[in-house]
Amino acid sequence: MTQTTVAIPDTHRDLLERPLIAHLATSRPDGSPQSNPVWFEWDGAEIRISQTKTRQKLRNIEHDARVALSIVDPANPYRYLELRGRVARVEGDPRNELIDRLAARYLNQPSYPWHQPGDQRVVVHIQPTDYSAMGADG
Amino acid sequence: MTQTTVAIPDTHRDLLERPLIAHLATSRPDGSPQSNPVWFEWDGAEIRISQTKTRQKLRNIEHDARVALSIVDPANPYRYLELRGRVARVEGDPRNELIDRLAARYLNQPSYPWHQPGDQRVVVHIQPTDYSAMGADG
């Protein structure tokens, strides 16, 4: 099923463009919620996060693709963006391309410094379907 | 049912004691997750948030009492606390006592400056039942 992604308002696009921490809400297999801080990148349409295959939140989204994210402006905590969306797909990342891009974005380092031998990474593609933008610009 | 609350490790208690923004994950009535930044207070055993009666997240927790919270150290985003828990009860707050305490904690103001006539507030009491503490102290 194709699904048009939502347009994020200009007043709050910076919260996706800047290397801020997003808090990702997922549902555990028993239906209870889970909240995790995550790095992310945004290409103007979808949000991507990197995940090792063994983590609980990957099991959660394999069970239920519905997720939510909230991102606060650290300079003004009353300005924030809440997104809801769906995991469109999960793809292998055998060359660690996304986590290395995120290391550049968040750490200004060419590759992810905490990679462990044996870690198998995937790219989680999230399509936003709804949002709430709170607080004034700036 | 009585339920003993979890002991938060000393290395991460400050994240509950400081006036930081927590991200609250709840489940909407259709089972999809929602994530909202919230103010909170912690008394060493339970977490309390203030909520107006009309907000979606109050409807969510009336439908499913299971919640999760994540709190990041703004000085070190790789140090954070993730909590899961249950809403033990929701009580009326006709004198706005909790939101005024939170205004003192977060804004250093004696009362909540954005109170609207007609807003009816409740206190949401959250008992943590499980946690993950990530990152080193300091």
Image (cartoon, coloured by chain):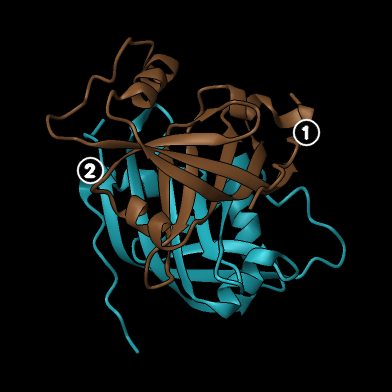
Chain colours: A cyan, B brown
Q: Is residue B70 left or right of residue B136?
A: left
Q: Residue at x 49, y 75 (%)?
A: A65
Asked whether the residues under marks 2 and 1 belong to the same chain, the reply is: no
Amino acid type at circle 1 is Pro
Could you tell me which chain the residue with mark 2 belongs to?
A
Q: Which mark is residue A52?
A: none
In the image, B99 versus B95, the foreground residue is B95
Could you tell me which chain the residue with mark 1 belongs to?
B
Rendered location of residue A26, percent (x, y): 53, 64
Amino acid type at circle 2 is Thr
Rendered location of residue A16, percent (x, y): 39, 49
Placement of B101 over or under A126, stated as above or below: above
* Residue lying at the far right of the rendered structure: A117
Neighbourhood count class around disc 1 (C-alpha, 10 Å): few under 14, some 14–19, many 20 upward: few
Q: Residue at x 57, y 22 (%)?
A: B18
Q: Nearer the viewer, mark 2 or mark 1?
A: 1
Element carrying mark 2: helix
Distance in Å between CA atoms under marks 2 and 1: 39 Å
Name the residue carrying label 1. B9
